[in-house]
Amino acid sequence: MALLKIIKHPDPKLRKKAAAVTEITPELLTLADDMLETMYAAPGIGLAATQIGRQLSLVVIDISEEKDQPLTLINPLITKLSSGVVVNEEGCLSVPGIYEEVERAESVTLNYTNSEGEEIELETDGVLAICIQHELEHLDGKLFVDHLSRLKQERIRKKLLKQQKESM
Ligand code: NI
């Protein structure tokens, strides 16, 4: 296992769209394990391959307190979003130190392939539904800050650029 480097906003790599995974190889499973380790170490509850510079439709999530319920989502696809919405404060490992309220669908239906190659349909709500929506946006090259006003987005971009300059 290895810790991977998490790419930070506004790196253009975060804007790339993921390609579908065509085969579950040992390399892919190692990558998923490394992503989980990186996510736990950060610490975070979700990580998309986009965030470590890989254009693959691969997401890892674990919202459990004990960090013992990892989910590996291969080629995840939301097939249903509830019309009911919830507003929650979100953060992102690629947008460190920024927490802002975002509106999301309250529940989702998700289709994905797990690490054993099984096709799964998952209907869920709460934190997991929010996390799924957040992570799947990464695969489309989107970030949670895209939901905010232009003014806020610009402030956040400048703040992060300043932080990155100072830490170099
Ligand atoms: Ni994120």
Image (cartoon, rainbow, N blue to C red):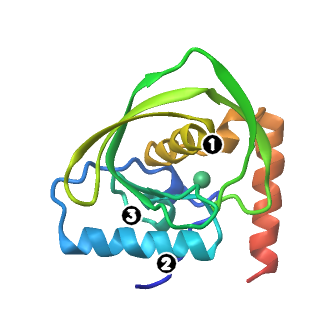
92 left or right of 25 in image: right
Q: Residues within 10 Å of mark 1 (few under 14, many from 20)?
A: few
Q: Nearer the viewer, mark 3 or mark 2?
A: 2
Q: Secondary structure at mark 1?
A: helix
Q: Residue at (51%, 43%) from the top-left corner?
A: 132
Q: Residues within 10 Å of mark 2 (few under 14, many from 20)?
A: some
Q: Are marks 2 and 1 in contact (CB under 8 Å)?
A: no
Q: Give x and y (percent) for residue 78.
A: 40, 32
Amino acid under disc 1: Val
Q: Give x and y (percent) for residue 116.
A: 22, 59
Residue at label 1?
127
Q: Residue at (56%, 43%) from the top-left corner?
A: 128
Amino acid under disc 3: Arg
Quadrant assignment for the N terminus: bottom left
Q: CA distance from mark 3 to mark 2?
A: 11 Å
Residue at label 3?
54
Q: Residue at (37%, 68%) from the top-left corner?
A: 32
Residue 33: which disc?
none
Q: Earlier in the sequence, mark 2 or mark 1?
A: 2
Q: Is residue 40 above or below residue 61?
A: below
Q: Is residue 12 above or below residue 101?
A: below
Q: Residues within 10 Å of mark 3 (few under 14, many from 20)?
A: some
Q: Nearer the viewer, mark 1 or mark 3?
A: 1
Q: Earlier in the sequence, mark 3 or mark 2?
A: 2
Quarter of image, res 39: bottom right
